[in-house]
Structure formats: C-alpha cells, structure tokens
Amino acid sequence: MMKLNADLGESFGHWQATSDQDIMAYIDQANVACGYHAGDPKVLQRTVALVKRHNVSLGAHPSYPDLQGFGRRSMRIPADELIPMIHAQMAIVEGMAKCQNVALEYVKPHGALYNDMMQHAQVFEDVVSAMAEYHQRYPLMIQALANNDFHRQIASHHNIDLIFEAFADRRYTATGYLESRQNPDAVLSSIEALAQARLLIERGEVITDQGKRISIVADSLCVHGDSPDALKMVSQIREILQQQGV
C-alpha cells in the first residue's frame, strides 16, 4: 500500500517554512530536517511532538551543511567527512525523538545530497556506508526509478533495506530523474501535482517533460512541505489514497 510522506521541520528561528501541524494530519511519514539545511532544536522538538500526536513515522532528513542554500547546492565531500555528518544528523533526530518516547524509523537524504546520491554511484555508496556503520540499522528512502537494480545491489551488500518513493509535485525527465530546480517548470502546480499523484497511485506511471509515460513502482509518495499549496495537495492526495482503499 502506498504511503504519503512530506519534508517537514524546516522552519528556523522566527522563520516559518511550512504549516507542519496541518500537513502532519494527512501524511504517513515525516522526513524531519536535522539542522544542516533547516530546522533548529526547538523546531525539531515541536515537530517530533506533532509526529507523536498524529502517529506518523519519523524519518531523519540529513543534508549537506548548507543553511544558506537550503541544502540544494551540491558539494563534493569525501566519505570520511560525509559519513560522520550523516551520523551526527541521524543522532540528533534519534536522540531528540527518544526524549518524547518516539522512535526513528528511517532516513531520507535531502536536496542536493539526495540528487547526488541517486545520480552518482560513489555518493550512494557513501550514504549506504553511513547507514551500515551507524549503531542501529534503519531503512533508507530513495527515489524509485524504472531500474533500481544498482541501488538494490549496493544496499543488499550492506544489509540496508530500501524504501522507494515517487514525487507528486516534481516534474520528471525522460530518464526518470527529477527536473533540475534551476528549470522554472521543475515544481508542478497543485493541479499538475494532483494529476501526477493520481496517475502514480492508480497506474504506477508518470508523464515526463517530453510527454513519455514511464513506470514507477513506489512504496511512498512525496510532497515537499515548501511547495506551493502543500497543504491542499496532501489533503487531496489523501482523498485519492482513501478512494483506493490505502
């Protein structure tokens, strides 16, 4: 059964990024910022409390160290630096969650780290190594592609389970990856996102930027918390999932 996830906890200080409390009521999984691209201890504490109140699965959402760029700028960070960065972010969420008797359940990298992980073999191996070297094994959420054989092979070698996700609010390229955010059409409107979500839920397909249909087998469907009309999207997608008996 397909689940619905969102990137949340991305406020910082007095700056409020999303309406986490409203969005949380409609989702199954919350990917919570760890402080490297957004979030702070107070925001994290509040977000974990919402996760607990709504009985949502908690995921750590680690990124490159890039507050100014919201984690959306690619960085070349060697494994011996990247792995402890990921561990530190996982530990922050895991520890803060324990304070409220909430368990961390999975990890989903954010932004440029996520895209680099999906498109560069070495970065993916570094991320999986970080997962394998942590004191406890957690599943890793990655993008569902037409062919994820490479990712499955690496994850299996390290005994890491994978959760495959598709995106409701992002445009896909003909290769099955996401359109770069540098393209003004990369983020779908709420109407386009709802249509894409319905196609993914009902048929396991997306229509690419070139009009081609490709098959996507996903465990979870993502809506970015900072997307326009994110709350409207998650509420309408939840209705579609309920109609499908999910």
Image (spheres, grey):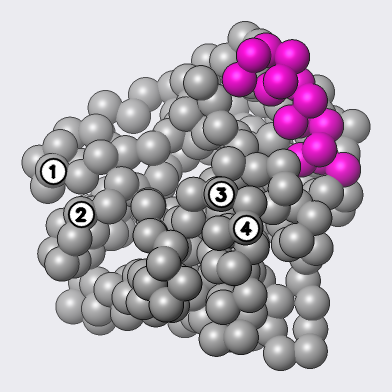
Residue located at (76% from left, 30% from top): 237
Instruction: Verify CB contact (< 8 Å) between mark 2 and mark 4.
Output: no
Determine the CA span between mark 3 and mark 1: 27 Å
Res 48 quadrant in image? bottom right
The magenta-colored residue range is 232-246
Quarter of the view holding residue 95: bottom left
Identify the disc placed on residue 176.
none
Q: Which residue is mark 3?
A: 55
Which type of secondary structure does the marked residue at label 1 adopt? loop
Please say whether residue 156 is visible from this viewpoint: yes
What separation in Å lies between label 2 and label 4 (alpha carbons)? Answer: 25 Å
Circle 1 packing at 10 Å, graded few (<14), some (14-19), many (20+), is some
Q: Earlier in the sequence, mark 3 or mark 1?
A: 3
Query: Amino acid type of disc 3?
Result: Asn
Label 3 environment density (alpha carbons within 10 Å; few <14, some 14–19, many ≥20): some
Quadrant showing the C terminus:
top right
Q: CA distance from mark 4 to mark 3?
A: 6 Å
Residue at disc 3, secondary structure: loop
Residue position marked by numbered label 2 in the rendering: 137
| Residue 53: assigned label | 4
- The label nearer to you, 1 versus 4, is 4
Residue at the outermost left position: 157
Mark 1 → mark 4, Cα distance in angstroms? 32 Å
- Which mark sits nearer the N-terminus, 2 or 4? 4
Front residue of this view, candidates 101 and 204: 101
Residue 150 image position (x, y, % from top left): 24, 34
Q: Nearer the viewer, mark 2 or mark 3?
A: 3
What is the x, y in percent for residue 124? 29, 52
Which amino acid type is marked by label 1?
Asn
Residue tagged by mark 1? 159
